[in-house]
Amino acid sequence: MTGYIPKGKGTVTLDARNLKCKINTLISPDQKVSISLLLTAEGQLNEKNTNLDLRASKNIKTLETALNAQLKKRIGNMIAKM
């Protein structure tokens, strides 16, 4: 996965591994269906084109937050097309 990191003013490429998905469904009393997805993964950073120093844990958190937001948006778009 390649994503743009706004605070780092560049992109990173992550090789996701050990992917896991947990799906929960709920039907409300008015028959509306709700689906909850919990995705977890481990990854290896393959390419870094940002100005972030990844030796600092706050910058790693920044990277994770940005990639999580982008992945959430991509999955939402994919589900909306179904």
Image (cartoon, rainbow, N blue to C red):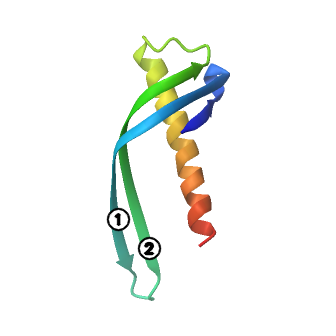
Which residue type carries mark 2? Answer: Ser
Q: Residues within 10 Å of mark 1 (few under 14, many from 20)?
A: few
Q: Residue at x 44, y 88 (%)?
A: 31
Within 10 Å of the Cα at label 2, are there few (<14), some (14-19), or many (20+) other Cα atoms? few
**Label 2 – label 1 distance at C-alpha:** 10 Å
Please, what secondary structure does the residue beneath circle 1 have?
strand
Q: Classify the position of the N terminus by image quarter.
A: top right
Kindly indicate whether the residue at mark 1 contacts the one at mark 2 (C-beta within 8 angstroms).
no
Q: Quick one: SS at disc 2?
A: strand
Indicate which disc, 2 or 1, sits on the residue closer to the N terminus: 1
The residue indicated by pointer 2 is: 34
The residue that disc 1 covers is 23
**Front in this rendered view, residue 33 or 46:** 46
Task: Please state the horizontal and vertical placement of residue 12, each as a whole percent of the image.
Answer: 57, 27
Where on the picture, by quarter, is residue 51?
Answer: top right
Q: Is residue 17 depicted above or below 82 in this figure? A: above
The percent position of residue 25, horizontal first and vertical second, equals 36, 73
Quadrant of residue 9 in the image?
Answer: top right
In the rendered structure, the answer to whether residue 45 lies left or right of residue 5 reads left
Which residue is more in the foreground, 56 or 18?
Answer: 18
70 up-or-down from 54: above or below: below
Which residue sits at x=35%, y=46%?
A: 40
Identify the residue at image location x=51%, y=11%. Answer: 53
Give the residue furthest to the bottom: 30
Where's the C terminus, which quadrant? bottom right
What percent of the width, then of the height, locates residue 59? 49, 19
Amino acid under disc 1: Ile
Q: Nearer the viewer, mark 2 or mark 1?
A: 1
Q: How many marks?
A: 2
